[in-house]
Amino acid sequence: MSLRFALPLRLLPGALLLASGCYLSHEIPEVGPPRTDAGVDAGHDASSDGGADAGRDAGDAGCIEELPDGSVTGQLDGSIGATCGALYQECPPHPDPMIDRDGDGFPNAIDCNDCEPGINPGAFDIPGNGYDEDCDGRDGLPTCNPPAATEGPSVADALAAIGLCASADGPRWGVVDARITRADGLGDPATLDQIAIVPRMGVNQPIARPRMLSLATGGAREPTVLGGERCVSFDARHEFPPGFPVESPFCPGVVSGPPHDSVALEVTLRVPTNAVGLTFASSFFTQEYPTFICSPFNDFYAVLLERGGEWTNIAFDSLGNAISVNNGLLQACIPGRHGGRDFSCDLGLGPLIGTGFDLDDCARLTGGRDGSGAGTGWLRTYTPVVGGETITLRFAIWDSADGYFDSMVLLDAFEWVVRPPVAPDCPRCP
Ligand SMILES: [Ca+2]
Ligand SMILES: [Ca+2]
Ligand SMILES: [Ca+2]
Ligand SMILES: [Ca+2]
């Protein structure tokens, strides 16, 4: 007999709402799949002008846009890589090995261009621009060897799946430390089946092929591999990570239940000396839609950033709301009015097909038909960084209030955002 039959039926969320109900209809920022040709591209310099593209590439348009000065998730319209003229000046030799003429912290003896702070052994080497920014004798980066598709991967393979494989050796940028943990960082997840490297998830292909990472509050692989694993509980009660819970303004009065079945990938990184930001792509799915919208079963996906002992969430929409079942980013779904809110489901059911979130896996828990789940479609998060600093990122997902009606997030295409020197007379985009 399945465990599910032994479970009590869930309360329908209508009974849990305050009388005022939810007052917003689907006010969301414009989001959708990252462009793969010349926009929110992943891992490749689509414009061939240098920087890894993290937004509309204004370099091709002959003008420069500013990046946002805070974290944002959605379609980025910031720009990098725009230049007007030579990227770097030549540097005449100097007899003193210890002098640091450009003040980048690297003395003349090991700084291959001691007149340009954007060039030193701690820099990110922008591929294909003809300059050896990281002083390793060549223009370009070592490539990540794609890990095999597997569940319960090693930490190194999990990082490689999203494009992080450099280690912070000596003065170089890269991974200082990493681990697979829970949302609260206090131990191991219930099972390593909650983390997987996948070549696809239903119709969803990696942004940076050939692999991406899946984190889930149930099984993390495709449902065809493990069967219907979108409604399982490992009955693992966890703590909230720092700063949570954060309640959604779309569901006033609703209080999220405590975390269950969480899993997280945590990585400490030394930031390249010439980086100004980092970005990554993510796609969140939940089986809590539609029945448990605006209820305590408000599963979360969060990316916590630690800097100098302070933790902040950087994965939130342009309205500043954390990404959860009750937030405003669910766009892949069947339209309807749920939890007092209207869902227009602009992406249709398409991104859910073959993910298991297109199925009615949890209907038995509600005593009737529950319907398909929902997803956000691909999102891209950007957050500013300080060159040379050390930060920790914790990519985390958890069930709220119980371990059933699972949620999942696909992660891919981690990139540093590097802004090469820009001539002061470069035109600004209108
Ligand atoms: Ca120097
Ligand atoms: Ca330098
Ligand atoms: Ca380069
Ligand atoms: Ca759940």
Image: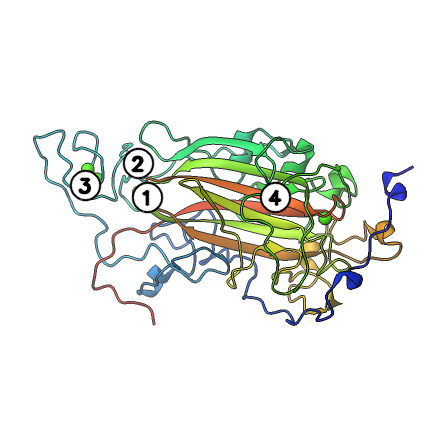
Identify the residue position indicated by label 4 in the image.
Answer: 240
Image quarter for residue 238?
top right
Please name the residue shown 63% across and 37% down the image. Answer: 196
Residue extending farthest right: 1
Would the CB of label 3 be found within 8 Å of ligand 1?
Answer: yes
- Mark 4 and mark 2 lie on one chain; the one further toward the N terminus is 2
Ligand 2 in which quarter: top left
Nearest the eye: 278 or 38: 278
Q: Amino acid at mark 3?
A: Gly
Identify the residue position indicated by label 1 in the image.
Answer: 387
Identify the residue position indicated by label 3 in the image.
Answer: 103
Considering the image in quadrants, where does the N terminus appear? Answer: top right
Q: Position of residue 393 (x, y in %)?
A: 49, 41
Q: Are marks 1 and 4 in contact (CB under 8 Å)?
A: no
Question: Which numbered mark, 2 or 3, is in the foreground of this view?
Answer: 3
Q: Position of residue 379 (x, y in %)?
A: 55, 55
Question: Which numbered mark, 3 or 4, is in the foreground of this view?
Answer: 4
Give how far apart the Cα atoms at labels 2 and 3 are.
13 Å
- Mark 1 and mark 4 lie on one chain; the one further toward the N terminus is 4
Question: Which numbered mark, 1 or 4, is in the foreground of this view?
Answer: 4
Q: Relative to 34, is 161 above or below?
A: above
- Mark 3 and mark 4 lie on one chain; the one further toward the N terminus is 3
Give how far apart the Cα atoms at labels 1 and 4 are.
30 Å
Determine whether the residue tagged by mark 2 lies in a helix, strand or loop. Answer: loop
Give how far apart the Cα atoms at labels 3 and 4 are.
42 Å
Please name the residue shown 30% across and 36% down the image. Answer: 122
Q: Residues within 10 Å of mark 2 (few under 14, many from 20)?
A: many
Q: Residues within 10 Å of mark 3 (few under 14, many from 20)?
A: few
- Mark 1 and mark 3 lie on one chain; the one further toward the N terminus is 3
